[in-house]
Image (cartoon, helix red, strand yellow):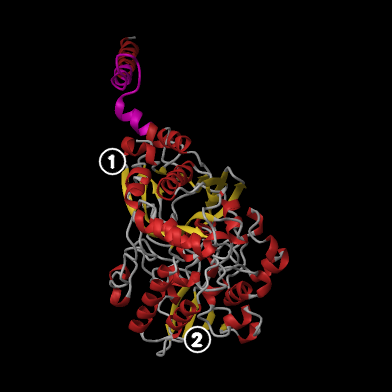
Amino acid sequence: MKRRNWLALLLTLVLALSALLAGCSANNNGTQSKSNSDTSKQTAKADEQVINLNLRADPPNLNPFTSTDIASFDVLNDVLDGLVRYDKNGEIKPGSGLAKSWDISSDGLTYTFHLKDGIKWSDGNPITAQDFEYSWKKVLDPKTASQYAYQFFYIQGAEEYNSGNGTADQVGIKALDDKTLQVKLKSPAPQFLGLTAFGTYLPQEKSFVEKIGVDKLGSSPDTLVYSGPFVIKEWNHDQSVVLEKNPNYWDKDSVKLEKVNFLIIKDANTQAQNYDNGTLDQMRVPSDLMEKYKNTKEFSVKPVAGNWYIQFNDKKGIFKNVNIRKAFTLAINRKAFTEQVLKDGSIPAMSIIPPGVPGYNNEDFIKQDGAPFFKDNDVQAAKDYLNKGLKELGLTKLPTITFTADDTTGAKKASEALQQMWKQNLGADVQLKNEAFKIRIDDMNKGNFDMVLAGWSADYNDPMTFLDMWETDNGNNTAFYSNPEYDKLIDQAKVTGDLKQRNDYMIQAEKIAMDDMAIGPLYFQAYALVTKSYVKDLIVPTFGTEFELKWAYIQGKNK
């Protein structure tokens, strides 16, 4: 009897102690302690590897053979790998892309690329050297009508094939076997290796393209096969593009993001609202909202190798006249435009090549080329050129002129400011035409414009990316500028093996283009950005694309 009472007492003590310990793990309100609560939250709310960005424009074309615009290349860079890929520091190293290594002959004319073992397309098929040979020759095929075909003209036989004066077999691109690609150049080209990372050099699977046809390539997520960090899962035109991690990517262990949501938001206030409420993780700061963000920890300014300019239609209307082009160029107050309209760190441009692009001996080209080529806001000279041009055209006054720009909030504000300057300084009646990005690109290609607000971002880190596009009949010369002496200098720059002479040819060519006012330089671009603190390693390259997402990740969003 006593023994049974002792056991009962012991059981009572155990139960009391259990209750006491349970009470120690709760506060006076009966809720969990902070340490346990935090552990629970961390387990339940680990950072999702999802990033949300604004693409700003619907890609007109996701066919790597024919794409020409930044919106398309931004996406293609995320879903396709080339022979090389620039690393976080903007450098090219062996193994950075699909090629594990390469050999360059002593004369600089023959490049032999060796592909990695085990690399696959997103459909599981192996990526081969034959895919590269097929893709590059398909860009050069005259039937493809690629505006960027000229980027391959460094290669033997490429220009001849593209112009209909040669055959595909005569092009110096050859798969020696499944893993070896040999490329023979016409002359040494220091920028060639970097070009192989460029969008038009990105390959597609030969059997896949032959199955669906070149015309359908890239028209929807299922009409591309992928070799890059991500694949396209959704493309909702004018709304969004959704990417997901590519499980077959050769370097998938370096890719932390599982999903990328590219929104397409044109309105500045809507963009800011989405950033403030966390729907966007990074944003280009609208000029009207610069004061709101510029003193925050999330704000930064990134100069890039890009120029914006007034593109004249040099082949028709009053802008065939060089003095009219000069009048409209010199009548702009770039200092006021960049500081009061843009407010994003962009600077006035009075030349074609932006700061930071290397010339001979890696010195800044803009320090070598003689820039600036004209005076900013030179109103009296602008009026003199206008009067001279009108006289040459047999006119007493300017006709009504249409100025085309994108339909984003920023583009509308910029075009209105320029319209006012031309009215005030030249008495010009300029009507604005704001239209969707892909429509603007199409109008430029077809010559359906008088003037257009246009921009160019460096495809690779060399002055030639800004110069050869203005050669007569170049696919991207939508100003339709033509000067035989200019063409000759650019062609000489492309074939000489003397790097100093090459640089001198480019300097002479830029001076000719500026004397002709082939385009009216406006500003050299910088991005004013706000980026959420939890976004890590989101690279904003100086040249090429606007985003490099391969190494980006989310950390601390839910802390």
Tell me the residue that label 2 is attached to.
186
> Which quadrant of the figure contains the C terminus?
top left
Callout 2: SS? loop
**Earlier-in-chain disc, 1 versus 2:** 2
Residue 506 placement: quadrant: bottom left
Q: Main secondary structure of the magenta part?
A: helix
- Is residue 74 a member of the stretch shown in magenta? no
Between circles 1 and 2, the one closer to the viewer is: 2
How much space separates mark 1 and mark 2, taking CA atoms?
50 Å
Q: Which residues are magenta?
A: 18-40
Is 501 on the left-hand or right-hand side of 428?
left
Type of the residue with mark 2: Lys
Q: Looking at the picture, how far across and down is residue 160, in whole percent?
A: 60, 83
Of residues 398 and 58, the one drawn nearer to the viewer in this rendering: 398
Q: Looking at the picture, how far across and down is residue 122, in whole percent?
A: 59, 61
Q: Which mark is residue 321?
A: none
Tell me the residue that label 1 is attached to.
297
Callout 1: SS? loop
